[in-house]
Image (cartoon, rainbow, N blue to C red):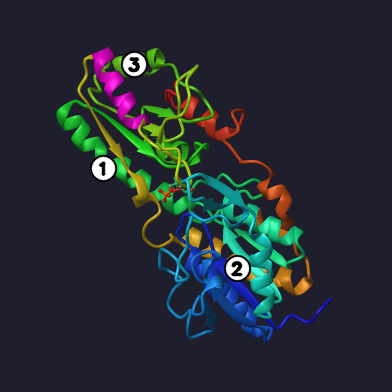
Amino acid sequence: MTQIRRIAVNTGGGDAPGLNAVIRAIVLSAEQLGWEVYGILDGYNGLFRDEGVIRLDRKAVRGITHLGGTILGTTNRGNPAKWPVVAADGTVTHEDRTQEVVDAIKARDIDVLIAIGGDGSLGIANLLSQKGLAVIGVPKTIDNDLAATTLTFGFTTAVETATEALGKLHSTAEAHERVMVVELMGRTAGWISLFAGIAATADVILIPEIPYDLDSVCAKIERRYTSGSEFAIVVVAEGAFPKGGTPLFKQKTGGQARLGGIGKMVADQISERTGRESRELVLGHLQRGGGPNAYDRLLALRFGAAAVRIAAQGTFGTMVALDPPLVLAVPLADAVAKIKTVPLDGDIIQTARSLGICLGD
Ligand code: F6P
């Protein structure tokens, strides 16, 4: 194996609280081994412009552990494996430019890439690894939907933000005797909605893993109103959909498809069916904003330090993963092979049911 002298790190996909903590841990751990660290700006885009790759030393990462966002910038557009090419007549085709990414990294004498990302970015990292680049992935997403790791950093911070928001809605819901319907992020997985909904004592939680029946939702709301609690909190994951239906999208073309709109639909339907006044709220990017909580800071620092240890061992084509109490290396291909959804036979679903929360079925 060649001696490692220079490594690069990038952040891709939607940001998640804890990205900066991972970057700092990588820089500090690598410096102890005498390696130089470089940061690629804006996903892989920085590779293709002069000032797009910056030196990261101890000074560059001072005081960033607690900061949200990413000092490297990120993007969830312009996937180099499916690069959009617009013809003169306006038709769009896609081409694979991953070899250009590999060549650009090698041209800069980078020995190892540490790619911090979700399933999309790590899918690209996996392709780069198959093309011979020494790659290690670090799992990031507030959605917690990456397979092969128990948790991704950013998730518990998003859950905390959502829980606080749901908690605050109780008083106004009660004051007006309203049904408050809150749409939370999570793409095709219900992790954020389920965790925050249970923690915030929601009455109904609708997740993509359990297609819902509106009759059952409305019956639960009616039971609440007639049993003395004349308000209700309904959590709807952005990817939830009714039995026999499909998820709602705000935008399907022109980049990554964006889910959205189900919260308003559910709120309107509840009002129509029950006659109870309802309001909807889309919590949106607040769930990604701000700094990481203590747990996510620590997880991010552990992931960054582990990525450098795994690089030093030469175990490439892998992703660092939390397998409590360990942080270990798993094959990147396994991590991106499928999305991790909420298991229906798990304790968290059973807990919701034991508490009398309606899951829409
Ligand atoms: O994957 C993270 C996430 O926040 C999802 O929960 C959400 O569907 C999506 O990103 C939103 O993406 P964008 O930032 O492009 O609106």
Mark identifier at residue 47: none
Q: What element carries label 3?
A: helix
Magenta-colored stretch includes residue 268:
yes
Q: Earlier in the sequence, mark 2 or mark 3?
A: 3
Q: Which of 176 and 273 is in front in this view?
A: 273
Query: How packed is label 3: few (under 14 Cα within 10 Å), some, or many (20 or more)?
Result: many
Residues shaded magenta: 262-274
Q: Position of residue 232 (x, y in %)?
A: 28, 27
Say how many tags the image has: 3
Which three-letter amino acid code belongs to the residue tagged 1?
Answer: Lys
Distance (Cα) linking label 1 and label 3: 23 Å
Position above or below: 59 against 303? below
Q: Which residue is drawn at 52% across and 66% down?
A: 45
Q: Where is residue 170 in the image (x, y as percent from the top left)?
A: 25, 36
Distance (Cα) linking label 2 and label 1: 35 Å
Query: How packed is label 1: few (under 14 Cα within 10 Å), some, or many (20 or more)?
Result: few
Q: Is residue 325 visible?
A: no
Q: Earlier in the sequence, mark 2 or mark 1?
A: 1
User: Which residue is under mark 3?
Assistant: 218
Which three-letter amino acid code belongs to the residue tagged 2?
Answer: Gly
User: Which residue is under mark 1?
Assistant: 168
Q: Is mark 1 on a helix, strand or loop?
A: helix
